[in-house]
Amino acid sequence: MTHDVEQSVMDAMRAPVAIGSERYNTILTFLYHEASLLDNLKISEWGNILATDLLYNIPIRHTRSSRDNAMSVVRTCQHMLDDYRSMLGRIMRLEGNSAWAEDPPSRVRRFITNVLVYETDKADEFLVVSNMLVTRNRFDDDQYDLISGVRTDILRLDEASYKLARREIILDQAVLGTPNLGIFL
Amino acid sequence: MSRNKNELADGTNIADLVRIDTREVQMRTLEDREIYELEQERLFGKTWLMLGHESEIPNSNDFVLRYMGDDSVIVTRTKDGEVHVSLNVCPHRGMKICTTEAGNSPVHTCIYHGWAFRSNGDFLGSPIEKECMHGKIMEKEELGLRKARVTLYGGLIFATWNLEGESFDEFLGDAKWYYDLMFCRSDAGMEVAGPPQRFIVRANWKTAGEQSAADGFHTLMLHRWLGEVGNYKKEGAGSDLAEEMYGAEVSSPHGHALRCIDLARKIRRLTGKEPSELSLEEKLRILPPPGMTAETVDQLKNNLTDDQMEVLAWMPPQVGGMFPNIVFAFIYIPQPDGTVIGSMALHTYVPKGPDKLEFMNWVLVEKDTPPELKEQMVKQTLNLLGTSGMVEQDDSDTWPQMTISAKGPQGSKSTMKYQAIYETSKPKGWPGPGIVNEGFTKDDTQWHWWLYWLELMTAEK
């Protein structure tokens, strides 16, 4: 499995899709729609936008010196490392009767910003980089768990819309401030 | 008159928080600053603590930062290959010497005034040598970093501030015989898949700690989904989970605990035969321990006794813990295609105040696990355990609620009960040592965990 996200971003930088163009707008609409599905707990509908060759991973972050900063993203062990099949397993669990970590469900809001879109060497695939801020609140907590990071996605054209084929989320915390990743980012 | 050192500020005797006759523990233990501070001294300042695995620092001058209780420590490998653990506090003005989580450096220099230390913690010197800015009152030998006592066990790094206390082997006691089945069984040994996952759970560390002492029972309810939509779902209705709760449980006077789960059902499913019809070698080849293969199980006899191999093929330890804050999972997970893939993980629950813990999760593999199997194991482990693990998500959502319960004036006086008591003893023909009981999971192991907590909390100096 390739993890060379930075390289694919660099390669794609050569072919940005203009902000405000029709292509950009349809992709932005897809991202907003996706966030709305998850915020509103339409988990199995979210499952329908996943490509069957999906790779979804969340590396560990390490506090490293400036010199070693390239090593601050760790992909040997990760917080999450899923494919389509395992993601369907997660969805099945959440749709079942006893997924206590999300029952009652967290109140979650996904803020997706700084969206940049690039063409790739495949005509039907686009590389999408976005910032993400997720607020998560549970039970009587007066505080929010904040989860922030940058997402690098590959979206694949699928008739009128897109499928999510690849997502890597680089988080901004070395020690996550939320008790689990029982929600999708 | 100074009060009894085992008495809390309000006059409560610590010993009264644990009711021996009725096997109850007061919830107050889960949310009390004073108890927390005593634990830092009497538990985390005394027992052996797990800090990681030596495969995290394979090269000389490699280091990682870890915690011993509330103290940050630097775990290093020196040029001679030795592992050292030093307090990450500059003896000069108390600045953290090391501010990065991992790296490689022969010298650790404090960024405040520049006092420098070798990777074994010895003081090297301070800048502007001719001015002797470390003064002349203390010798250089006295200005090194405070060093913990270190031992390696099966590649795991343990350290303690108790320089003269019991040895690590004494600490493990009879339980070592069983831990050897996991950590000391193969020729090449274990390695970590990578650095640990780290995340915060707003719960007292003991909510996780007492569960780590082999709480099998919670699996049936808290992890019920496993029998509803997961790998243990039976064809048709119902679940196999309850049957997975039978086996033998090992307790220890030192609070260690292991749940040894019978492999008979898995072996029957894989072979269609009764385990009694198969030889020891056949059983191990059919269902090798997690991370091992039909090819590498031959190594077991190089490292284990016949008795140990018998338990490994019959009822191997699959979940449990090591006092005070360690959990292990060495589990055999049935796959949709009928095969079995193992998962291995170790957690520590690092205390971060009375109502906060840091969950650290190391994923383990055998060094000579074939790469493709390694990848499958790591993926499966991340899927089930730790940050996003479908099993442990439910645990990390439970412990905060217990901690909140303990804050209520009535809740704090409520008790946790450990009254499901074994009335059996060792399984017939069981060759292993220690306190062992057969049957459906009970509360004994967790009760022993609390008894050792109490012993340390009330120990004479």
Image: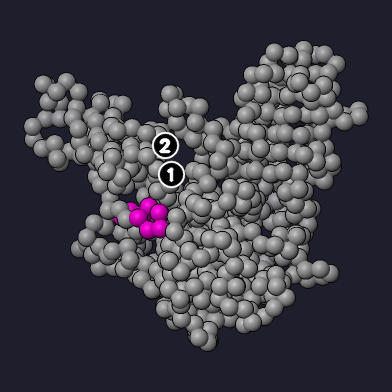
Q: Reply above or below: B43 against B258.
A: above
**Disc 1 element:** helix
User: Mark number for residue B56?
Assistant: 1
Whole-percent x, y for residue B294 in the image = 59, 63
- Determine crowd level at label 1: few under 14, some 14-19, many 20+ residues with C-alpha closer than 10 A: many
Question: Is B260 on the left or on the right of A108, as rendered?
Answer: left
Tags 1 and 2 both on a single chain = yes
User: Horizontally, is B62 left or right of B115 in the view?
Assistant: right
Whether residue B70 appears in this view of the structure is no
The part of the chain drawn in magenta is B152-160
The chain to which mark 2 is attached is B
Q: Is residue B263 visible?
A: yes
**Amino acid type of the residue tagged 2 in the rendering:** Ala
Residue plotted at (70% across, 34% down): A167
Q: Is residue B154 magenta?
A: yes
Counting from the top left corner in percent of width and height, residue B51 is at 40, 50
Nearer the observer: mark 1 or 2; the answer is 1
Residue A93 at x, y percent in the picture: 75, 54
Q: For the N terminus of chain B, which image quadrant?
A: bottom left
Residue drawn at the location 42% of the way across and 50% of the way down = B53
**Label 2 belongs to which residue?**
B102
- Quadrant the C terminus of chain B occupies: bottom left
Q: Could you say which quadrant of the image residue A64 lies in?
A: top left
The answer to whether marks 1 and 2 mark residues whose Cβ atoms lie closer than 8 Å is yes
Farthest residue to the left: give it: B136
Above or below, A134 against B190 in this view is: above
Asked which secondary structure carries label 2, the reply is strand
Tell which of A166 and B210 is nearer to you.
A166
